[in-house]
Image: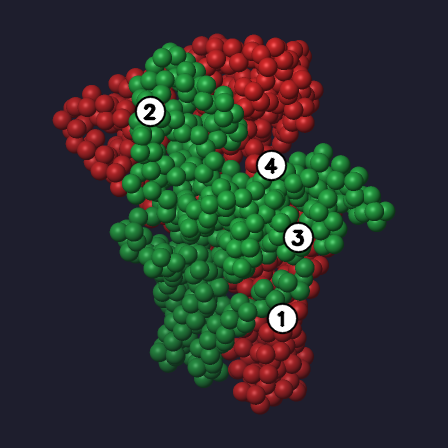
Chain colours: A green, B red
Amino acid sequence: MQERNRILSVAAGNLLKKDDIKKVIALLDKLHPADAAEVVSSLPEENQKRIFETWDVPHAADALQEMDESEQIDIVDLLSTPLVSDIMEEMAADDVADLLGGLDKQDAERILTAMNREDAVEVLRLMQHKEDTAGGIMTPEFIALRKDMTAQESIDLLREKAPDAETVYYIFIVNKENQLVGVISLRDLIIAKADQRIEEIMNPNVIYVDVDTDQEEVARIMSRYDLLAVPVVDYEHHLLGIVTIDDVVDVIEKEASEDIYRLGGVTREERLDSPAMESIRNRLPWMSFNLLTASFAAGVVYLFRGTIDNLVILAAIMPIVAGTGGNMGTQTLAITIRGIALGQLEFREGMRVVARQVGIGATIGATTGLLAAIIASFTSRNPFLGLVLFLAMIINMGIGGLVGAGFPIVLRLLGRDPALGSGVLVTAFTDVFGFLTFLGLATLMLGLLI
Amino acid sequence: MQERNRILSVAAGNLLKKDDIKKVIALLDKLHPADAAEVVSSLPEENQKRIFETWDVPHAADALQEMDESEQIDIVDLLSTPLVSDIMEEMAADDVADLLGGLDKQDAERILTAMNREDAVEVLRLMQHKEDTAGGIMTPEFIALRKDMTAQESIDLLREKAPDAETVYYIFIVNKENQLVGVISLRDLIIAKADQRIEEIMNPNVIYVDVDTDQEEVARIMSRYDLLAVPVVDYEHHLLGIVTIDDVVDVIEKEASEDIYRLGGVTREERLDSPAMESIRNRLPWMSFNLLTASFAAGVVYLFRGTIDNLVILAAIMPIVAGTGGNMGTQTLAITIRGIALGQLEFREGMRVVARQVGIGATIGATTGLLAAIIASFTSRNPFLGLVLFLAMIINMGIGGLVGAGFPIVLRLLGRDPALGSGVLVTAFTDVFGFLTFLGLATLMLGLLI
């Protein structure tokens, strides 16, 4: 929370104690909706309720729109259905569709019934699309021009409809069947002669996305071609809506967060300022799973307890094999997850990429393993111990490359989130296989080692 | 690389073998500059040279602008100074400034001297700003209106200057001293009466950034307030330029990549399709460092070889303590790095955040540790072994919380990249301290254990 908003939040709390709700609302109305939303969210529930019940509807809608979905749901639960439906009529239809998608089905239906028919139909149409597709993030609020209009007619239409700054950077052109046929910039429209037909001046090579294109793919396309908006079409090429860059910024940030959390083994979103109990509840299941994988590694060592009993230095060296293999695995995982997110990977190349990472892992294993082996041979005065370490590091760092690249690529091929094969799983593998190869080889060569 | 571009690349290569450079250029001119750039980059150097020497300058500039900085530098090195300066005159000044900043000082000066004076001065002015600040990513190519103009005069000016789609979503307003005083949307300008003065219709509450604001902070502000462009001012509030959303998308993606790589222990950017030798060269120094930290952990175990010799099951259990502590550390690291990137952290809260993460770590350590202790007590028929494991897991998972949150927060306070305290360093700590606490406690209580 920003410092200023924290102070405002305290001030609002004090004013509310004195029942001075009018002053609080006057104060909120002077803020940017994103800041007003933050201040309101920080207040106790009963005060949130009082504010929303007194606030004028358009300002309340602006603030609600800026909140996280979970905060929105909390507010909606506090308010009466007629008030909620009034507020939602003022919100952007795509935001309403997202919010209703997060509510109980019955609550959503009750609110939709209370909304005016036109808005409700638009929201319902949007709710048919999956939330993480182009259809789920597009807005139907845009202006399209018909290709047989003249430049002057077009400018007059734009002037009359007084578009938002948000939707006017590109103007998309459709034919009589509402099929997308071109795009024109405001610049070209302004320069054009008044009686020129749009058809003659538009750019017919318009970059578009299908309604069920994954939102990450939409983000990649907009980022690649530096687009501020991209049109969304159905399978008959009808123009359904546009995705604007600000929604895509949210997608990029959310997907990056997800990848970072998964890589670190965090399965549910958690903020630095989340309550401690919530953090513990979130992480405990995954840590219990980690206890299980760590127990496998312990089991492998236990299998070889006889070998360690014969040569206790093995217990000191085995963490080197496990640790370097784990590091190779997480390095490869980070590169692969990011590579997939940035669209560097083509599927038919999948196996070649994995093979290359295995090769890279084994080569680095051989290089660092040689160094480690020389040191181990000299300190233990036993070259065979060095040989075991050398071989185990090659194998285990190869395995690090295999699982680090293989997990996310296979998950992606199966249509799952590539980051599910998180750092914890990768290091569980390299721990188990590190102990297995090192202690296994040592057991085979035990006669030479002692 | 996209499938279509790969095919085009092969086609271009074949045409060039037949010396049919005109056809290649005709083919490139039909593509989006981002695609043309990708196709050209995939060709051998001598062909890149031939294409750029034949290409018309505006198309060459468009394509060059879309390349990565390293690709741009390779192209510039192939071409003559007069040709490079011609191309650069056609490029956006901020892109030229970035590119020249990446060249040798002498080369940059030679190119600047060959450019026309006006463009060179603009580029030089931009080059004074650090690359990762608002000044470094802003464009000076925008249109500002004076507050004493009328709405009609403003529209006429916009029409005459025929702005790019890129820079017209908001129009910023200045006074006679070129100080930023307001903002107006095209929508409000169009609706206004012809003789109304801008001053009366503009919004004086304009969100801006200072010229030396860090680019990550610029991205946070634009994302928070859903801005398409933000004005950049100097310390006397003079309007210097604007940062547009497409540049910020690049910043967000780059910063997310950096965090992911650092978390995975990758210090230099690496692509999935990088040549294997390059990957090995990149990763080898860091893996050698990892070998060193793993050797510390091995050294700790070696110190306690006597204890392990007495009770070999300790060698099997110790990876559980190290592994769960390491996992707690990377979880906490992921949450902290992302929290800092998303601006959730305030500095005066730093120590409180670390303390909370230590508490979370120790609590989860106690919970999973109790489970592990019960199992260990029963399988080994020795409750004291369970007690040692329980205590070691509490301590080491607390340490995981400490280093996972502490490293990035301290680095941030020192003004360094918080992600430098990467996963490898964190797990090195939890390995060393995990073995130390577990084997240390076991040594202290050895009388009760055997």
Q: Position of residue A90 (x, y in %)?
A: 58, 40
Name the mark on residue A147: 2
Is residue A204 shown left or right of residue A157? Answer: left
Q: Earlier in the sequence, mark 3 or mark 2?
A: 3
Name the mark on residue B225: 4
Q: Is residue B238 above or below residue A449?
A: above
Do marks 1 and 3 both belong to one polypeptide chain?
Answer: no
On what subunit does the disc labeled 3 rest? A
Front-lying residue, A77 or B33: A77
Do marks 3 and 2 both belong to one polypeptide chain?
Answer: yes
Q: Position of residue B32 (x, y in %)?
A: 32, 29
Question: Residue at the location (53% across, 59% down)?
Answer: A106
Q: Residues within 10 Å of mark 3 (few under 14, many from 20)?
A: some
Q: Position of residue A364 (x, y in %)?
A: 39, 55
Q: Disc 4 to disc 2, how far (Cα)?
A: 35 Å
Amino acid type at circle 4 is: Tyr
